[in-house]
Image (spheres, rainbow, N blue to C red):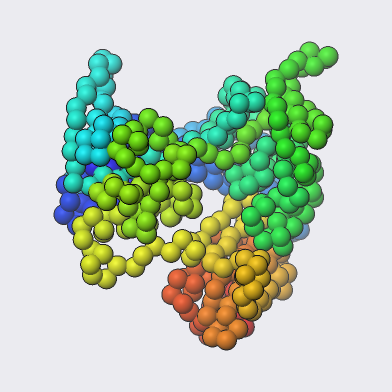
Amino acid sequence: MIIGGGPAGNTAATHAARLGAEVTLIERDVIGGAAHLWDCIPSKTMIATGGAIAFTRRLEGMGLEQQAPEVDVEALTERIESIKMRLQRSTTNLLTSQGVTLVHGTARFLSANDIEVTTVDDDGVPTVKVIQADAVLVATGTRPRIPEWCHPDGERILTTRDCYPPKTFPESITVVGSGVTGVEFVHMFSSFGAKVTLVVSRQQVLPNKDPEVAAVLEDDFLKRGVSLLKGARAIAIDRVTNEAGVEEVVVRCDDGRVVRSSHAVLAIGSVPNTDTLGLDAAGLQHDGGYVTINRHCQSNVPHIYAAGDISGKLPLSSVASMQGRKVAEHVMGLQKVAHRHLDYDKAASAIFTEPEIADVGLAEADAFAVGRKIRVTKVPFSSTPKALINNDWRGFVKIISDPATGVVLGGSIVGRHAAELISVIALAVTANLKVTDIVESLLVHPALAEALAEAAD
């Protein structure tokens, strides 16, 4: 039994079914995952549209007359919904084609072996039954964290899920939270022409990223007219009517600074969707709702697994999908044969700002923190012909390797198509390739990937 139909759940379901398991998947909302279809895909769709608008601002440098496109909110909304529905249908069809039983309902543990499943018919009449399974995967995901001092209304005070797109496009907006989600919102709304203020609780955006990477992004934000409130932590967000009779949102910070804008959006993390699952009834160890797992994604109760965001590991769809695959293999006994354990330190991640940011493996700062010897090479895109052709040479490629063996340990990319280019370094990190393997690859010319070979050289 699988509880949750997001990337972890549906991957585990299809893979286990192919391996011969009888699979039942329970999902209360949408197959494909609420976070995937309500957050990731809609946000990246809007970012793509915003990126197209931003690109038009560079047309003059490419020998074309600069354009000023207007946003068709209705068409954009239809586009987002169309993509979501297409992906949902595709995932559902794949599951049913593999013989997976889909149940639209909720589940909770009565004990480690008994699971109560509740479904509701078309007339609103609930049906409750208790089911047992040889193995159970919990993959219920997370939802936006909302602090006590903020009360989102879905109109002007927004959570991340109110923004795809918002009911009205903001003239100005304050983004609270400078992590991955926050900076993507800054990029998205500034691309659509809004005046954006970013509340940064520390002294750099993306506090957990390479300072050189953050510096490139900050520089781009400032050039766009984004205001950065560094060292400020929001403590209150209120919707008010000013002296001119205009509604606005006031964000108050702990250092006394106040920001006024037409809208505000919270992007300060998430909380696990496990509060109604009966984790304690099942005897599951957890930390604030995040289930504790081992390298097989097993909880302390051997036949109960957890994957995706609620596992407390990297909150990435790619990681969730791979966890689901590994769970299916472990349940079906494949760990007794060839079975590669999931190494979270080798997971690639990307931030879809402009320029894009991507990294994988060992970070430069982490290596220095533990005194590890590394070789760091960095090549700016400004020396790459294709970047000049594209009229966009922001950013760089950085590769980290072992100076003794030449094995690629990690890397960072800032620039156009960074999310695609990082795959080369990710493959090298996963397969323990050497920098010479990249250097001696016959890459396309002209291409942005040439910067990878130059950095590896």
Q: In the depicted view, which residue is nearer to us: 46 or 22?
A: 22
Residue 409 visible in the shown view = yes
349, above or below 53, in the image: below
Taking the image as shown, residue 122 lies to the left or right of residue 149, namely: left
Foreground: 325 or 58?
325
Q: Position of residue 336 (x, y in %)?
A: 23, 67
When the figure is inspected, residue 68 is found, relative to residue 368, above or below; the finding is: above
What residue is at 43 percent from the left and 55 percent from the top? 319
Place of residue 189 in the rendered image (x, y in percent of width and height, measured from the top left)? 67, 39
- Residue 106 on image: x %, y %: 31, 30
The C terminus sits in image quarter:
bottom right
Quarter of the figure that contains the N terminus: top left
Quadrant hosting residue 382: bottom right
Residue 3 position within the rendered picture, expressed as x and y whole percent measured from the top left: 31, 39
Left or right: 93 as drawn, with respect to 165: left
Q: Is residue 262 visible?
A: no
Front residue of this view, candidates 229 and 284: 284
The residue sitting at 71% across, 70% down in the picture is 380
Q: Is residue 430 above or below residue 28?
A: below
At 76% from the left edge and 33% from the top edge, which residue is drawn? 253
Count of numbered labels shown in the rendering? 0
Residue at 62%, 34% (x, y): give it: 266
Above or below residue 4? Residue 245 is above
Taking the image as shown, residue 389 lies to the left or right of residue 73, namely: right
